Amino acid sequence: KGDNLDGKKSAEVIHKLYETGFFSDIVLLRDNNELIIRVTERPSIARIEISGNKDIDTDQLMDALKSIGLKEGNIFNRSALDRIELELERQYLSQGKYGVQIKSGVSESERNQV
């Protein structure tokens, strides 16, 4: 016989799974006396492309992306991409480049990759 799963333990299980960063959705289900954990995995990064950058070297941009976990093979985190966009805008503004527009795009590809 296994352990009983109450609301507190259920919340703890869900929280711990979310903390891994691998899942975008987690649902706990019960089938008679069996616990079923249904997860939706976050996509991994298949490829990163940078275009239109003239003032900051592409290698520097790629290093900055890697430093926050945005690199090929890693799990994609939209909030990390949003943070880097804001930081790039600040960098350009600090250099007096007020007309700069930073745009990012994410395209889904096969096998849960972006």
Image: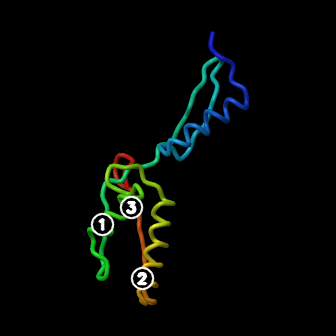
The Cα–Cα distance between marks 3 and 1, rounded to whole angstroms, is 11 Å
Residue type at mark 3: give it.
Ser
Q: Position of residue 103 (x, y in %)?
A: 42, 75
Q: Image quadrant of residue 49?
A: bottom left
Q: In the image, what residue type sits under mark 2?
A: Tyr
Left or right: 74 with respect to 58? Answer: right
Name the amino acid type tagged 1: Glu
Q: Give the mark, 2 or 1, whose residue is nearer the N terminus.
A: 1
Q: Which residue is mark 1?
A: 49
Residue 35 in the image: x percent, y percent? 60, 24
Q: Which residue is mark 3?
A: 107
Secondary element type, mark 1: loop
Disc number lying in front (3 or 1): 1
- Residue located 47% across and 78% down the image: 90
Residue extending furthest toward the front: 94
Say above or below: 110 vs 33.
below
Query: Which residue, given by chain and number where applicable, does mark 2 sit on?
Result: 92
